[in-house]
């Protein structure tokens, strides 16, 4: 089950930025290192992105804007190098999406006003502020059907989104230096109901400049889903194009990552029949990811998807590799460890 | 492990060992939130003595916050997400370690039953349909059996806990046992007014279990009448708020037979007995949801800076409700 080729470009890029790739100054849980001691060899996984997201949330809470700027700068360099740690930058969007909805609007506005006073030229701040307005808009609207939304909530939704769009428009010069500007711009424009050509234009520009920044892809993908008037054929075309664009450094990993987003929004019981997802390609994508950055999270996601795809042999193999670490379907509604174990044993 | 550490570092920064809130031994909302965090942390760190002690403290029916929440509910709120996302091997290992450390614990089998019951519902998947794939239903049944065995292991001592009855009701309901109402009557006699007893029974009156909203409404009105002596009409609002909370794939609250005038009267009773901002915020949220301008305005005024509307209600927020009560500007009169 231990797999295959790590793309050559990844290895080369890893070698070219050794110190940056292992820099853990932002992580309070990183292993203590004596000055001059060789840095430990870290392979960044989803768990590290979560740790970085927590560090970002804590820095926002303590108004440590310099730390935020430095993390952004270093993570962006890692992303652009295409090496180990190239996905750490997505921790910013994760942090915004996780922490902003839980906070009071007045407190958030104060944070951004302080950030502006401290570092008025910051492009990161402008992108983050757009994410804040986007969050406040959705908080006002709620996630229910349009028919459940009051007229006042719709009005607030629209005015917050317009505020975000204005901020993005005014901050193009510094903002576009960060991929976070593009992910925010697509999310805001999509929520405002802009036509596909506008979203495609933003996406193409962003993905050309920052081809490895996953949240740009996720943001565009969202508005191709059926609940936004799209369909699974367009979703599939988009995901295949994303894989072609990123294959040099990512292998086919984007295939499974973007289809995982599609699965999150899917509420039926026949994912591989009702969407255009191909289990054969998804399996290949999981194997690519395990070759690059093996982790229990990926193995558990692999086993869960194999189980959903009714691939008994793969489910059994991956479950055997996980042993007592098997924990399938955390955060998913249609899969659990116990059911997949039973399925792997031959249950129907 | 890294992920667990990350979550703990953001949510549970150095929580102290559990202690009664305040010198007088009373609990407030902050103590309740701290208890939820502490239970999750004690579970993750295998601090079983702490869990036993907290459970013992919360058995006291007076262990409630000023808004009327039972401290024992902290176990449910803490365990539901943790046990739904921990793998079964980890759950088994933790309970095995607990059993080894305290073989005669009455709390361990109780929480073990609670855990397998949660895993059962997770295995069943598809919250809006009783009929999942056969393998899911078989595993669901096996895990419920496991939960029931753990309940039996706890013996009579475990019946002191409302959690025992909550799990029993969920198992009996899932098995469509005819003794469900008898079990609720027994539970009510043992621990009157514990909210999860009623919501556990109510679940099996919902359409996905062959019930309908008329039966749900009759049940809620019966419970409100039965608890009138202690809680006034408050249970009418409490149980309908619970319905708004459990929104898996349909908006049960909006589909139900809820009456705003009855809910308003129920909230008034609740506020009289438990005049806490938490309850007032709930009241204001549902008043805004019902577009009752006068009540929303009054409550927002009373809450002032403590206003925090929106619990379990999509598109309800301080901002949107303030917009709603704003006087409309008069159209200009043409002369």
Image (tube, rainbow, N blue to C red):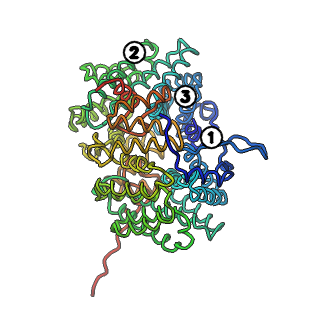
Q: Position of residue A317 (x, y in %)?
A: 42, 29
Q: Is residue A171 above or below residue B157?
A: below
The residue under label 1 is B13
The residue under label 3 is B43
Q: Quadrant of the N terminus of chain B?
A: top right
Residue drawn at the location 31% of the way across and 20% of the way down: B183
Residue drawn at the location 48% of the way across and 29% of the way down: A321
Q: Is residue B4 above or below residue B95?
A: below
Position of A83 with respect to A98 (left or right) is: right
Q: Measure the C-alpha gap from mark 3 to mark 1.
A: 15 Å
Q: Measure the C-alpha gap from mark 1 to mark 2.
A: 36 Å
Q: Position of residue A29 (x, y in %)?
A: 66, 42
Q: Which of the 4 image quadrants contains residue B215?
A: top left
Looking at this view, name the residue that lies furthest to the bottom: B335
Secondary structure, mark 1, is loop
Residue A58 versus residue A33: which sits nearer the camera?
A33
The residue under label 2 is B149
Q: Which of the 4 image quadrants contains residue A330?
A: top left
Callout 3: few (<14), some (14-19), or many (20+) C-alpha neighbours within 10 Å? some
């Amino acid at each position: 089950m231990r797999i295959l080729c790590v793309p050559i470009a990844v290895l080369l890029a890893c070698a070219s930025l050794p110190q940056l790739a292992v820099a853990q100054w932002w992580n309070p849980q990183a292993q203590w290192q004596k000055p001059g001691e060789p840095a430990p060899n870290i392979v960044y996984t989803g768990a590290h992105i979560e740790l970085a997201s927590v560090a970002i949330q804590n820095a926002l809470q303590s108004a440590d804007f310099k730390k935020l700027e430095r993390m952004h700068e270093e993570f962006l360099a890692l992303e652009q190098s295409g090496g180990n740690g190239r996905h750490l930058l997505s921790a910013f969007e994760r942090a915004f999406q996780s922490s902003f909805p839980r906070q009071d609007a007045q407190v958030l506005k104060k944070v951004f006003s302080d950030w502006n006073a401290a570092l008025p030229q910051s492009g990161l701040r402008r992108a983050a502020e757009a994410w804040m307005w986007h969050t406040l808009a959705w908080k006002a609207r709620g996630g229910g059907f349009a028919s459940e939304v009051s007229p006042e909530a719709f009005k607030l939704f629209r005015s917050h989104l317009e505020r975000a769009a204005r901020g993005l428009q005014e901050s193009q010069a510094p903002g576009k230096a960060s991929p976070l500007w593009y992910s925010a711009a697509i999310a805001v424009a999509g929520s405002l109901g802009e036509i596909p050509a506008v979203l495609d234009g933003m996406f193409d520009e962003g993905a050309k400049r920052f081809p490895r920044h996953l949240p740009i892809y996720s943001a565009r993908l969202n508005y191709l889903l059926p609940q936004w008037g799209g369909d699974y054929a367009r979703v599939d075309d988009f995901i295949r194009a994303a894989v072609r664009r990123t294959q040099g450094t990512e292998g086919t990993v984007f295939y499974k990552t973007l289809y995982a987003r599609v699965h999150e929004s899917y509420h039926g019981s026949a994912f591989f029949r009702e969407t255009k997802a191909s289990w054969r390609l998804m399996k290949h994508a999981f194997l690519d990811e395990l070759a690059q950055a093996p982790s229990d999270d990926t193995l558990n996601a692999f086993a869960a998807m194999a189980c959903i795809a009714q691939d008994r042999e793969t489910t059994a193999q991956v479950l055997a590799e996980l042993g007592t670490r098997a924990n399938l379907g955390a955060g998913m509604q249609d899969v659990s460890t116990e059911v997949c174990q039973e399925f792997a044993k031959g249950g129907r | 492990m890294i992920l667990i550490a990350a979550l703990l570092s953001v949510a549970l920064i150095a929580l102290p060992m559990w202690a009664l809130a305040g010198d007088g031994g009373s609990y407030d909302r902050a103590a309740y939130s701290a208890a939820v965090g502490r239970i999750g942390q004690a579970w993750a760190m295998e601090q079983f003595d702490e869990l036993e002690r907290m459970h013992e403290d919360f058995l006291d029916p007076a262990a409630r916050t000023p808004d009327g929440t039972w401290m024992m509910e902290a176990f449910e709120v803490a365990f539901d997400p943790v046990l739904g996302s921990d793998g079964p091997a980890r759950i088994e290992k933790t309970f095995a370690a607990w059993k080894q450390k305290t073989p005669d614990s009455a709390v361990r089998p109780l929480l073990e039953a609670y855990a397998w019951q949660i895993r059962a519902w997770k295995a069943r998947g598809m919250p809006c349909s009783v009929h999942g794939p056969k393998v899911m239903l078989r595993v669901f049944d096996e895990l419920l059996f496991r939960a029931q065995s753990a309940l039996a292991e706890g013996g009579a001592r475990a019946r002191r806990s409302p959690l025992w009855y909550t799990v029993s009701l969920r198992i009996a309901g899932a098995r469509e046992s005819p003794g469900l109402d008898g079990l609720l009557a027994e539970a009510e006699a043992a621990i009157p007014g514990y909210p999860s007893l009623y919501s556990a029974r109510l679940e099996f009156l919902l359409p996905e279990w062959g019930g309908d909203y008329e039966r749900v409404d009759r049940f809620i009105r019966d419970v409100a009448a039965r608890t009138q002596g202690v809680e006034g009409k408050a249970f009418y609002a409490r149980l309908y708020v619970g319905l708004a909370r459990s929104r898996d794939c349909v908006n049960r609250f909006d589909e139900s037979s809820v009456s705003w005038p009855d809910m308003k009267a129920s909230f008034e009773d609740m506020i009289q007995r438990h005049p806490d901002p938490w309850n007032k915020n709930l009241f204001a949220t549902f008043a805004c949801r019902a577009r009752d301008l006068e009540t929303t305005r009054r409550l927002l005024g009373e809450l002032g800076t403590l206003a925090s509307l929106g619990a379990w209600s999509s598109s309800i927020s301080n901002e949107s409700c303030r917009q709603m009560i704003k006087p409309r500007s008069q159209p200009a009169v043409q002369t």
